[in-house]
Image: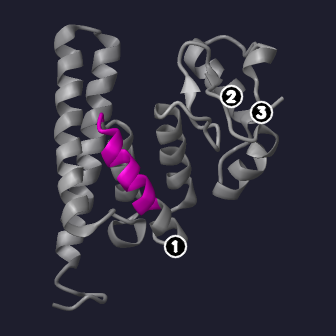
Amino acid sequence: MQTGRGSATEPQQAGLAAELVRRAEEDQRLTRLAREAPTALNRHYVTRCRGANADALRSVVTRRGWPEAGQVGEPASTAALMILLHTADLGFQLTCRDLIAEAVADGGCPAVHHAYIADHCAVELGQPQFYGTRINADTLCPYPIRHPETVEERRQDVGLAPLAEHLPALRHVVSGIPDRGCPVSATPWA
């Protein structure tokens, strides 16, 4: 089997890419539906979809490793990351976090992918996050950040907007009212 351009694996990669994107889009569709009509049945559909997506991603990772952007395209690799972030299995997330870190180091994935999964895992483990990507839904403030005095530099290094720009925009979108900011005690980088 060839591995270069025009190889026999290209149709398989395209099929995998399409499936990852389809699965992530279905999760988004069902999540929107559950927000618009918050019934137990709609929440069940989201849970069932995310479970099936996790099983499918686990199978892909077991067979061939993390689906890197250089292999399946950035949209499909981002879709895989979204599926991973919605997986209930922290052990699997930790394994993939390390695979994504390797892919980033080898140039196979955007650095921002590692930022999101690293922060997710840190918060789930009760540890401070590194990049401030995880936001508490109740306060609309970031969960605690490790070395907050340098968070903006780390965010810039991976292509994330500064928190000072991101948070007001996020709060306005979520609440529909102008940003009032985080309480001083909840603003670890100030």
Name the residue located 57 percent from the left edge and 35 percent from the top edge. Answer: 127
Residue placed under numbered mark 1 in the picture: 107
Q: Which mark is residue 164?
A: 3
Q: Position of residue 91 (x, y in %)?
A: 33, 44
Name the residue rendered at 38%, 58% in the picture: 77
- Give coordinates of residue 174: x percent, y percent: 56, 18
Looking at the image, can residue 109 be seen?
Answer: no
Q: Dot 2: within a 10 Å radius of its alpha carbon, few (fewer than 14), some, or many (20 or more) residues?
A: many
User: Which residue in the protein does label 2 denote?
Assistant: 167
Q: Is residue 138 above or below residue 32?
A: above
Question: Is 40 a magenta residue?
Answer: no
Q: Is residue 78 left or right of residue 14?
A: right
Please report the residue visible at 62 percent of the width from the left and 35 percent of the height from the top. Answer: 128
Distance from the alpha carbon under mark 1 to that under mark 3: 29 Å
Question: Does residue 93 belong to the magenta stretch?
Answer: yes
Q: Secondary structure at mark 2?
A: helix
Image-based side of 112 in relation to 23, left or right: right
Say if residue 116 shows up in the picture.
yes
Local crowd at mark 3 within 10 Å, few (<14), some, or many (≥20)? few
The quarter of the picture where the N terminus appears is bottom left
Q: Judge by depth and name the residue closer to the eye, 167 or 97.
A: 97
The residue segment tinted magenta is: 88-100
Task: Please identify, in this view, whether the residue under mark 2 or under mark 1 is nearer the observer.
Answer: 1
Mark 3 and mark 2 in contact? Answer it, CB < 8 Å.
Answer: yes
Residue type at mark 1 is Gly
